[in-house]
Amino acid sequence: MNGQDLVYDWRFNVVDEPTEWAFNWDYAEGGTSNPTPREHHATMWMVMNDHDPVWGVKKYFKHAAKSFPIKLVTTNPVSETEDNDEDDGDGVYKFRVVHKTSKAILFEGVMNKPDPENPDPNVGNYAQFRAKTKDGDAMMKNMNYGNHGKIAYIPHIRTEVGLDGGYRVVSTTGTGPDESEDADSTSSRDRLASRFQLFHEEEEVARCHMTYRDGSWDPSMGPTIEMIAVKQSRRGEGLAKVLWYWVLRFIEQNFTIECLNNDAPVGHIMIKATQVSTQEVEMRQRKRDGSLVPVGFKHLLFDFCSFSVREQKGVMGFMFGSRRPKDEEAVLYIPLLKPAVLAKKRKTDKSEAPKPGSGIMRSKCGERMCHWCNGVGLDHMRCSKCEEAFYCNPKCQKSDWKRHKKWCSKTRDEVQARLIKEGGMTEDGALVMKSMF
């Protein structure tokens, strides 16, 4: 830390001023901001952990051809070709799954060429396929059975779940309304997204946006939570926890792929959140006095959704070697449940869902970052006054108090006034940056 500590805390720790929906929902970093369902369209991911993942894809389809009338045709990004293979040379393997009799293309897919000389320790290898016809969608869905943990089938559809009290949850999955239908296009295959909306009667009261490939340089496999917020006029009613419950149910039921990253626990799905910021997205009720206090996006994920700080490696580790905080990246691992367990849970989803109305939010902390030494751990102590700063131990908390007291339990207006007084901000609200990185 240097003389601009309060500028740093203003940018990365102090909850931002409230707005109606907290984010610009017309922009998404890793996928379309307007997912549009299309009949008989679907996406299928296939994860491979072989020494040669492309060989694994070919082996899978060779085995599948014993049960289904299909044939895999591969376009190689290298000069060496095998039987029935073509040569392209663009660094991406391209696949076509065709019907043996009709020769019709059922679905198409891609896989990036693995780089054995520069492996990224964050990444598992996977192929992505897109179906655009009734026969292709049906075949893709059938192939998903019996491959739990290795394949995820996600149809591009809109679903609705009715809840008690006039509430309902709507999920919409698809690429954008004007997206290219070229399955070989990198931009097309990366634009898939899901939008979750919580309605009360006809009013939208909370929303969440999820993509399947984040916008950073980290290509790790897993759904990415880009935004989640409660409408400003409805904050303090516990609606964020209601919506998050149904987002988790969607991921459990649909994204049935075991994460193969080196640091992931065995038998788990990875959920990511990137560029985690401090916009106010909810209000919570304090148990000790009943007052409502703002909850930022970062605090919602870490304090109440069980996300942990994601320590970066490889390329991302180099990028985060700067003075930006480690807790801009978050990860949550949830168990990959067996099909029988998922079927059983579907019967009790509604009865176990949290109910709107209470602003009290139960803490579910994951691993947090120490605000003094940046150490990451699960048992960090929390500042009892503001309940927002975390420390490894009392020594770290005491060392940080000179800096932390400037924003501890302060409103955003109070911190802004202090910033202006110290010369870290101009009267019109512009930050004065001095050797921040």
Image (cartoon, rainbow, N blue to C red):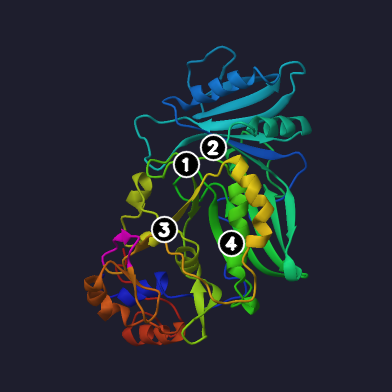
Q: Which residue is mark 2?
A: 149
Measuring 69% from the left and 39% from the top, which residue is drawn there? 42
Q: Which quarter of the image is occupied by the N terminus?
A: bottom left
Q: Earlier in the sequence, mark 2 or mark 1?
A: 2
Residue bearing mark 3: 308
In the picture of the structure, the residue carrying the numbered disc 1 is: 267
Q: Is residue 244 visible?
A: yes
Tell me if label 4 and label 2 are in contact, CB under 8 Å: no
- Give the amino acid type for the residue marked by disc 1 in the picture: Gly
Q: CA distance from mark 1 to mark 4?
A: 22 Å
Q: Report the front residue among 357 and 228.
A: 357
Q: At 37% across and 40% down in the image, what residue appears? A: 121
> To which quarter of the image does residue 371 belong?
bottom left
**Seen from this angle, which residue lies furthest top?**
83
Give the residue at mark 4. Answer: 244
Q: Earlier in the sequence, mark 4 or mark 2?
A: 2
Residue 245 lies, with reference to residue 127, above or below; the image says below
Mark 3 → mark 2, Cα distance in angstroms: 23 Å
Q: Residues within 10 Å of mark 4 (few under 14, many from 20)?
A: many
Q: Position of residue 272 (x, y in %)?
A: 49, 53
Q: Which mark is residue 80?
A: none
Q: Residue at (47%, 70%) from the top-left corner?
A: 278
Secondary structure mostly taken by the magenta-highlighted segment of the chain: loop
Secondary-structure class at tag 4: helix
The answer to the question of whether label 4 and label 3 lie on touching residues, with beta carbons closer than 8 A, is no
